[in-house]
Image (spheres, rainbow, N blue to C red):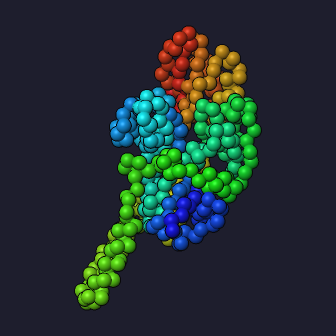
Amino acid sequence: MSRRLYGFLTDIINENGALITSDSTSVALASVSVKDVVILFVPGMDVGIFSAKLPVRNDNEARHAAAYALEDEIAVAIEDTHFAIGSAGEDLQMPRQVHIIAKETMRVWTDYLSTMPMLAQAILVATPSVLRPGDVFETDGRVMANMADKIFSVEAAMPAKMLDVLLNGQQAQLVSRSELLQKLAERDEPLSELLDLRQGVFKAEKGKRLQSFKQWRLCGALACLLFIGWFAMNFLQTYGMNREAEMIDEEIREIYLELYPNAPVTNDYMRALTRATNDRISKTQTDFRSSSATLYNALEKLPGMELRSLSFDRAHGGLIARISYADFGDDIVLKSVLGEAGVSASLGAARQEGNRVVGDVILGTEP
């Protein structure tokens, strides 16, 4: 009998989490079968959740359309971004869900899943996207919310006034990670309503585990018919697989040593690379908190300016603030105030919108 199992991907990778059923029963990874449906929740801080009109029904074309529809809303290069889209309704003029994430992050996650046969077909879902309207939870220093017009996840340590604006004054319910996982699992949403991030080039290969099982059964049948022939074939296949695994391990080792030449020697470079990646993400999130606090304090000194949106450019390490102000040149004043506070900034493109000017200010980068 098939089961639907839930877990947090990062906890599974770090070996400090487990899968559970919708009634919160813990399930060991080793007991997961090919019939089970595994849903792994990924950090909302890594996924941007939007909606856009995509007047095409073909999913590949819709993903391309989403890239251009949201080009002005994201602060990273389109070619470095993966777009996952929700299912289309009968009316193509109705907005569809669009989730965006860095391609490199998706590669790290899917590469890990490919090494775990029981998770090879796992569905990857952004944690905040499963929240019900009005839900606001805080866990492990993160706040995730499903508000009337936006679904998002931010750091709980961001300036209180900014957080209050984002949450429309609503207080977050404090829960542990295990309690949050139980709440998500209890909802047991239909699969058609979940937006799987594994689309396009990151789509899971259907039937891979079943095909592997059939190959082993075929080997057993051949052994009964001709033991010597099976033994020879099995030996050659095993030798080839071991050689391929050794080559992959060597490539991972070379990549790790190239990125971290002074790192100590380890027996598991795959795990070391994953942890190093998580450390880099953690440092980036610390910069986001510090820079956003400085920006908010600067805006309080300039009442004529209004913050439209915040986004983080992982490629260049800069926090991009979209600001609305009265006249061209006002952004130079904001840059000066930020510089006095010890934060470097450069000015991006600006354009006229009605009687206001809207421009980008990039924090953490030199002009």
Residue 247's spot in the image, x, y percent?
A: 35, 68
In the image, 111 versus 146, the foreground residue is 146
Is residue 23 shown above or below 286? below
Pinpoint residue 100: horizontal percent, then vertical percent: 48, 41
Q: Nearer the viewer, residue 272 or 305?
A: 305
Residue at screen point 56% across, 13% down = 356
Asked if residue 60 is positioned above or below residue 189 in the image, the reply reads: above
Relative side of 238 to 33, left or right:
left
Q: Is residue 171 visible?
A: yes
Residue 134 against residue 243 in the figure, above or below? above
x, y percent for residue 198: 44, 50
Which residue corresponds to the image point at 72% horizontal and 51% vertical from the top-left? 175
**Any part of residue 344 in sight:** no
Of residues 39 and 362, the one drawn nearer to the viewer in this rendering: 39
Q: Quadrant of residue 34?
A: bottom left
Residue 345 position in % (x across, y down): 57, 28
| Side of 226 relative to 176 (left or right) | left
